[in-house]
Structure formats: C-alpha cells, structure tokens
Image (tube, rainbow, N blue to C red):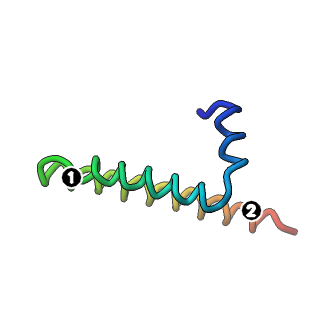
Amino acid sequence: MLSAETLEKYRRMSTGERLALTLELTADAEQSLLTGPPEVVRRRFELLRRQNDERNQRMLDGIARSEREIP
C-alpha cells in the first residue's frame, strides 16, 4: 500500500512525468522477467497470463452483474 505522501506526489506529477516513471519501472521489471533459465522465464510468463486472465474474468463478471442491476 502506498503512503498518503506518495499518492499525493503521484497526483501532482504531470502526465509526462507519470509516463516516464512507468516506462522506467517497466524496463526494470522486464530485465527481471527475462533473467534466468528458459523454463523459469516461461513459468513467469505463464503466471502473468493466468493472473491477467483471472483479472479480466473478474472485470467481465462485474460488468455483467452491473448490467443486470440496471433497471
């Protein structure tokens, strides 16, 4: 969980500053994702795909529930 100070710092950032930070963090994460034996890298990406699929399914379920609740 981010502190209130950190959240406020992010809110004050311009769009360009937030994008630069995002790209920097993505580059750092990419190095970690691709480091190691091929089997380990493959398992990492399988886990990411599975987590993304689960998250997408929960969003679709939520959208479906909200559409049913609209009169």
Q: Residue at x 68, y 41 (%)?
A: 9
Looking at the image, residue 46 lies above or below residue 67: above
Residue type at mark 2 is Ser
**Can you say which quadrant of the picture contains the C terminus?**
bottom right
Q: Residue at x 41, y 54 (%)?
A: 26
| Residue 1: assigned label | none
Q: Is residue 17 left or right of residue 22?
A: right
Q: Earlier in the sequence, mark 1 or mark 2?
A: 1
Q: Residue 7, percent across and down? A: 67, 40
Q: Secondary structure at mark 1?
A: helix
Q: Which residue is under mark 1?
A: 41
Q: Is residue 10 left or right of residue 26?
A: right
**Viewer-proximal residue among 33 and 62:** 33
**Viewer-proximal residue among 5 and 40:** 5
| Residue 66: assigned label | 2
Residue type at mark 1 is Val
**Can you say which quadrant of the picture contains the N terminus?**
top right
Calculate the distance from the C-alpha at mark 1 to the C-alpha at mark 2: 38 Å
Q: Is residue 32 left or right of residue 55?
A: left
Q: Residue 14, percent across and down? A: 68, 57
Q: Is residue 62 left or right of residue 27?
A: right
Q: Residue 5, percent across and down? A: 69, 32
**Viewer-proximal residue among 17 and 39:** 17
- Farthest right residue in view: 71
Q: Residue 66, percent across and down? A: 74, 62
Q: Secondary structure at mark 2?
A: helix
Q: Residue at x 52, y 52 (%)?
A: 21
Q: Residue at x 36, y 49 (%)?
A: 28
